[in-house]
Image (tube, rainbow, N blue to C red):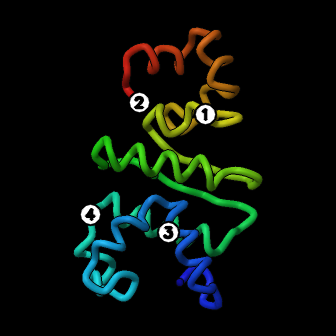
Amino acid sequence: MYGNPNATEEQLIDAAQKANIYEFIQTLPDGFDTLVGERGVLLSGGQKQRVSIARVFLKNPPVFIFDEATSSLDTESEVLIQQSLDLLSRNRTTIVIAHRLSTVKNADYLYVINEGKIAEHGTHTDLLEKKAYYHKLYTMNLF
């Protein structure tokens, strides 16, 4: 409930469901009251990310910044987090910093940075059509 200490249990459950972590929480011995160690040391990387996303759902900020949301995750966790981020990004300004194409390709607008400078910007489709740096990375599967 860090995202909203005044949240109801219903809101807590809703946030956990939207973050794709509710089913996992239900398997824990004490559900939402289970101790998971300092900084969530007993959770996997994907579980930690989904708990963080649930907190953001509870907070409901107008602007959301997520840095490397899917780095170092297994494929299943990446898919669950991407689904949550898509839902979370609706009707709010969202800034996503990422290396993986799967994380950014559905963005309304992209800024591609190379050697610390903006190399290109536009939509995913526009950037592919330009056949420049983004296209090169995309075709090399470096995302």
Q: Residue 124 appears in which quarter of the rendering?
A: top right
What residue appears at the point 62 percent right and 51 percent down from the top-left corner? Answer: 87
Q: Earlier in the sequence, mark 4 or mark 2?
A: 4
Q: Are marks 2 and 1 in contact (CB under 8 Å)?
A: no
Please tell me whether mark 1 sits on a helix, a strand or a loop. loop
Which residue is the site of mark 4?
44
Give the alpha-carbon distance from disc 4 to disc 1, as whole Å: 26 Å
What residue appears at the point 37 percent right and 21 percent down from the top-left corner? Answer: 141
Give the alpha-carbon distance from disc 2 to disc 1, as whole Å: 14 Å
Label 1 neighbour load within 10 Å: few <14, some 14-19, many 20+: few
Which residue is the site of mark 3?
16
Q: Camera-side residue: 94 or 86?
A: 86
Q: Indicate whether 2 appears above or below 129.
A: below
Question: How many numbered discs, if any?
Answer: 4
Q: Earlier in the sequence, mark 4 or mark 1?
A: 4
Which residue is the site of mark 2?
143
Give the alpha-carbon distance from disc 4 to disc 2, as whole Å: 23 Å
Q: Position of residue 38 (x, y in %)?
A: 29, 84
Q: Are marks 4 and 2 in contact (CB under 8 Å)?
A: no
